[in-house]
């Protein structure tokens, strides 16, 4: 992106921020397409909750809807482009590593980074989900659940703590990292346990 285009993009972001909750829908859409929003979706949502508590939950809902639309669009692009799109999404070794993770852990790799407000490579996992022909319904359900929990929690945090919200998130960054690891392990074990029981049911002799 040239400096001129960067300037236009930043002006667009500023204009959307000025629209408040409605602008948040479009910011969430842009962010979920894989174009980072400089101010950060989480910070903007908390700022709205702090300055206008009555708009906090409507803003969170619009952020969820925008994120769903953006992720669905990226998913559809990756699905249509298939593995070629996946191969063009970044460093080949890094992309292959994320694809291997997705093939092993499935939609858990989408849920965890979509849920937690810490920098995680959600875009590559979304691209992997689309390129590897994951079902659109389970994908959208996972993203929706993660975003509802994340954005509505941040709206509540902004209402409850006010100006202290940002400091709270910074002070607990490593707690979020630890929670991400524990959540990933727990979900992975549940999936493996479920697969194990299904395999046992398929191979069990007919008791009749």
Image (cartoon, helix red, strand yellow):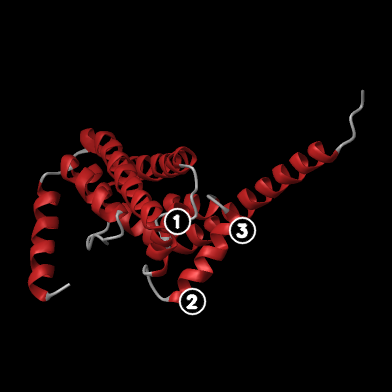
In percent of width and height, residue 85 lies at 37, 63
Callout 3: SS: helix
User: How far apart, in angstroms, are the residues tagged by discs 3 and 2?
Assistant: 17 Å
Q: Secondary structure at mark 2?
A: helix
Q: Is residue 188 toward the left or the right of residue 126 in the image?
A: right
> Where does the image place residue 70, in percent across and percent down from the top left?
30, 48
Q: CA distance from mark 3 to mark 1?
A: 15 Å
* x 39%, y 44%: residue: 147
Residue located beneath label 2 in the image: 93
* Of 8 and 160, the residue lying toward us: 8
Q: Earlier in the sequence, mark 3 or mark 1?
A: 3
Nearer to us of marks 1 and 2 is 1
Q: Is residue 5 above or below residue 51?
A: below
Tell me the element at label 1.
Answer: helix
Asked if 172 appears above or below 161 in the picture, the reply is below
Whether residue 119 appears in this view of the structure is: no
Q: Which residue is mark 1?
A: 131
Mark carried by residue 158:
none
Residue 104: numbered disc: 3
Quick one: quadrant of the C terminus?
top right
């Amino acid at each position: 992106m040239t400096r001129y285009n960067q300037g236009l993009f930043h002006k667009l972001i500023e204009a959307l921020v000025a629209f408040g909750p409605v602008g948040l829908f479009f910011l969430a859409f842009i962010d979920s397409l894989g174009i980072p929003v400089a101010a950060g979706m989480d910070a903007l949502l908390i700022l709205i909750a702090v300055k206008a508590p009555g708009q906090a939950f409507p803003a969170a809902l619009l952020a969820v809807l925008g994120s769903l639309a953006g992720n669905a669009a990226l998913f559809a692009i990756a699905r249509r482009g298939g593995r070629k799109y996946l191969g063009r999404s970044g460093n080949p070794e890094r992309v292959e590593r994320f694809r291997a993770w997705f093939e092993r852990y499935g939609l858990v790799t989408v849920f965890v980074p979509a849920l937690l407000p810490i920098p995680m490579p959600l875009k590559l996992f979304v691209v992997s989900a689309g390129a590897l022909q994951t079902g659109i319904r389970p994908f959208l359900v996972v993203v929706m659940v993660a975003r509802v929990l994340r954005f509505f929690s941040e709206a509540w945090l902004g209402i409850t703590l006010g100006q202290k919200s940002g400091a709270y998130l910074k002070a607990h960054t490593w707690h979020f990292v630890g929670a991400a690891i524990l959540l990933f392990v727990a979900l992975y074990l549940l999936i493996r346990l479920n697969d194990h029981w299904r395999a046992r049911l398929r191979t069990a002799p007919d008791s009749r």
